[in-house]
């Protein structure tokens, strides 16, 4: 029932205390709660059925295994191969009589006291030492220096001209002498006596002055 005020206007209805609280949540919040309940139910259902049905699906199971395997640590690298030692030919090794050995013998002057055979690889311009100094050292000790290379004859002739070293240069294209003497680096010097028997072999590379090697000095002294 509405009461009329003395001025003729009707009074507005007054809200009953606690009515707003009894009205309940709005429609939007109800829909959100229902949606969350459905999602929770689906998650619980998947958690229960997925582990059981996974092995029955080989394709999906294989993909998951490959995906999990991508997180494994990489296998360790293979071990490095050990460094090969520098081989030294045995003292007393005789220079071959034929092939490149014969060419080296023919290039040496007859009646020499001893010979310094020097391997220069296939590039005479990158041996890293002054071969003229080595030749001077050889002459001072009454040695005849002879160089040999694995390059062909034409290349060897060009190298010889560019070097300007007054010592013979013999071509060993098949590597007969370099293999026999274990010429693992360049330059590598070998001391032969007058009978072409090996008396000393350079033990390590990058040796500018041959006389700094005690083995070389002892071998030269023993030739006297």
Image (cartoon, rainbow, N blue to C red):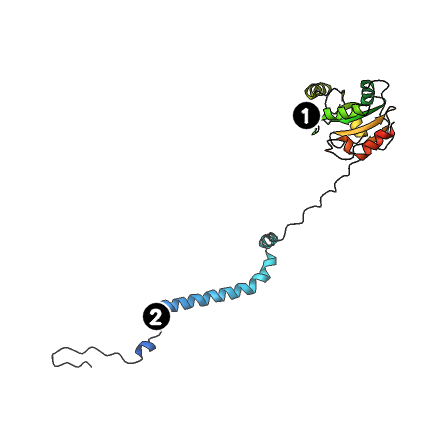
- Residue 25 lies, in percent from the top left, at 36, 72
**Residue, x 58% and y 60% (percent of image)?**
53
| Mark 1 or mark 2: whose residue is earlier in sequence | 2
Which residue position is annotated with label 1?
125
Q: In the drawing, does residue 68 fall left or right of residue 139?
A: left
**Residue, x 42% and y 68% (percent of image)?**
34
Q: Quadrant of residue 88?
A: top right
Q: Outermost residue, front direction?
A: 140
- Residue 95 lies, in percent from the top left, at 84, 25
Q: Is residue 115 visible?
A: yes
Bin the neighbour count of mark 2 within 10 Å (Cα to Cα): few under 14, some 14-19, many 20 and up.
few
Frontmost residue, 32 versus 84: 84
Relative to 114, say whether 69 is above or below.
below
Q: Quadrant of residue 161?
A: top right
- Residue 100 lies, in percent from the top left, at 80, 22
Which residue position is annotated with label 2?
26
Q: Which mark is residue 134?
A: none
Cα separation between marks 1 and 2: 95 Å
Bin the neighbour count of mark 1 within 10 Å (Cα to Cα): few under 14, some 14-19, many 20 and up.
few
At mark 2, the secondary structure is loop
User: Which quadrant: the N terminus?
Assistant: bottom left
Q: In the drawing, does residue 209 fall left or right of residue 59?
A: right
């Amino acid at each position: 029932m509405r009461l009329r005020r003395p001025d003729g206007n009707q009074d507005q209805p007054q809200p009953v205390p606690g009515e707003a609280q009894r009205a309940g949540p709005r429609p939007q919040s109800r829909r959100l709660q229902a949606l969350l309940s459905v999602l929770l139910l689906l998650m619980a259902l998947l958690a229960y059925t997925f582990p059981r049905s996974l092995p029955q699906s080989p394709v999906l199971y294989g993909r998951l295994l490959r995906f999990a395997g991508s997180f494994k640590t990489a296998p360790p690298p293979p071990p490095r191969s050990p460094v090969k030692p520098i081989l030294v030919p045995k003292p007393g090794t005789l220079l071959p009589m034929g092939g490149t050995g014969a060419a080296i013998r023919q290039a040496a002057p007859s009646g020499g006291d001893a010979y310094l055979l020097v391997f220069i690889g296939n590039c005479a311009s990158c041996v890293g030492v002054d071969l003229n100094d080595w030749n001077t050292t050889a002459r001072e000790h009454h040695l005849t220096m002879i160089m040999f290379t694995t390059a062909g004859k034409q290349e060897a002739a060009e190298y010889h001209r560019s070097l300007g070293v007054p010592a013979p240069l013999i071509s060993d294209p098949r590597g007969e002498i370099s293999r026999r003497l274990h010429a693992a680096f360049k330059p590598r010097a070998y001391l032969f006596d007058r009978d072409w028997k090996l008396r000393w072999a350079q033990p390590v590379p990058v040796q500018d002055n041959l006389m700094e090697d005690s083995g070389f000095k002892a071998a030269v002294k023993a030739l006297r």
